[in-house]
Amino acid sequence: MNTRKLKPITNKLLWIFAVGQFGWSLLSGIVTNWMVYYYTGSPDAQNPNTGIFASGITQNPILFKLTLFGLVLAVGRIFDAITDPLIAGWSDRSNYKGGRRIPFMRAIAVPFALVTIGLFTVPQTASIAANDAMLFVLLLMFYLVMTIFCTPYNALIAELGDTQEHRINVSTYISFTFIAGQSISFMLPNVAGFLEGAAGQAGSIRLAVAIMSAIACIAMLIPSFYIKERDYIDSKPSETKAFRSLLKTFSNGQFRRFVYSDVIYFFALTLFQTGLAFYETKLMEIEDTWTFVLTATMTFLSVLQYPIVNKLAPKLGKKKLIITGFFAYALVFLITSVCGKGLYWGFIVAVCASVPMAILGILPQACVADVAELSRLETGEDRSGMFFAARTFAFKMGQALAMVVFTSMTVAKTPASYRSTAVVATVTCLIGACLFFLYNEKMILTRIEELKTEK
């Protein structure tokens, strides 16, 4: 019998774990927030760097209104979604000396950062066809290395969240570091502008990406080397193969109800996030260097609300707050669709978005951790990695569709085309809110307590 005593999980440990989220969210933010902007946009007097790399790749629609860039992004996301359960199954079944999760994170942090740099550097030859091919391959590599890091990382949310309090706390901490990483990614034009005198316009953007990627890599390596997984988690390898485990996960009724709304929410959010730089520069006519200021404002106000969400979640329930967050985001998208010119519109959106950003940044992953914990208690098999991978598998399909929809709807690059994407985001977010009413949080938490008491 194994009598090894585990070290207690503390909030300090959870904060160190959360540093890794800052790293991967910074890399993800660079690609999500700026690739479309620099590879497909059109420059103007205020923002001359918009579309600075656009001449290097195919821009015209190749099928109906579908652009090559939109299809490349969509295929990348679909590839990403497919690899999620494979990596999750590999991680769940692994029995490395360093644990089931940490070895993956430690091995892939540096390649993750290097591929991010390559996306903005390599596809710049004189051949458009070669650039198209390299961009496609690099994007697939980016999503693969992101999956190899994030899937085991996300599984640790449930495993380090050994109690309801810790699950909410770790979700709060990683939400803070996630939006911190996303916010810093919006500084890319600012950093590039500072470096422009020495490196030129295109070179300054690439150098800014390299600097941010190096910072992200260090952040991902901190928990990978500090946390000794076996000291805190008595994990046993799962015996279920990847796709069978995926099917078992989706056979969980409560998990499916959660995913229905989650995939629609991420479709709406990705549509909005992809267009955010365009909404601010093309609709509000703000310089792109203001993007960071607006995002920092939104982040700061959101962080101020974290303690409130953290305290309200156990009292009111995560379900009620998440539904509130859905409706609040729908309002933000609606405001964006009717916004006018002027910096104040950017601040209106930033202030309003801080509320759902706080709620939906923290609580959904806590819901997944709850469902994974109940499954573990009922079956005796810990498949936390697969539950988080199944969630990402589903919402990445929504993200892939959003990429295709956004690039197709905005082929004309007119203000009306950008407004229409915000309208679509509004409608789909409202649908997601309605679907989340089907999720039964009370039953899940009650059953967890009953099974723990029985043991």
Image (cartoon, rainbow, N blue to C red):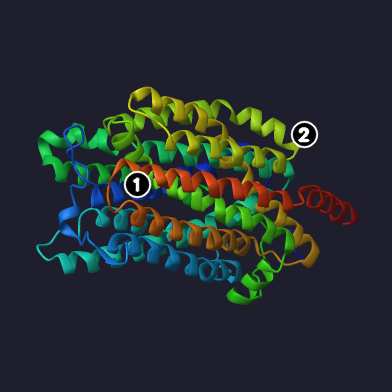
Q: Amino acid at mark 2?
A: Lys
Residue 67: give its label: none
Query: Which image quarter: residue 411?
Result: bottom left
All told, the count of numbered labels is 2
Q: Report crowding for label 1: few under 14, some 14 to 19, many 20 or more residues within 10 A (C-alpha).
A: some
- Residue at figure coordinates x 56%, y 31% from the top left: 355
Residue placed under numbered mark 2 in the picture: 315
Query: Which image quarter: residue 73?
Result: bottom left
Identify the secondary structure beneath mark 2.
Answer: helix
**3D distance between C-alphas at marks 2 and 1:** 43 Å
Q: Is residue 232 above or below residue 340?
A: below
In the drawing, does residue 374 fall left or right of residue 288?
A: right
The quadrant of the picture occupied by the N terminus is: bottom right
Q: Closer to the camera, 161 or 76?
A: 76
The quadrant of the picture occupied by the C terminus is: bottom right
**Percent position of residue 361, x then y:** 56, 41
- Residue at figure coordinates x 20%, y 32% from the top left: 46
Q: Is residue 53 above or below residue 393?
A: above
- Residue at figure coordinates x 33%, y 27% from the top left: 341
Q: Report crowding for label 2: few under 14, some 14 to 19, many 20 or more residues within 10 A (C-alpha).
A: few
Q: Amino acid at mark 1?
A: Ser
* Whether residue 101 is visible: no
Residue placed under numbered mark 1 in the picture: 417
Q: Earlier in the sequence, mark 2 or mark 1?
A: 2
The answer to whether mark 2 and mark 1 are in CB contact below 8 A is no
* Whether residue 441 is visible: yes
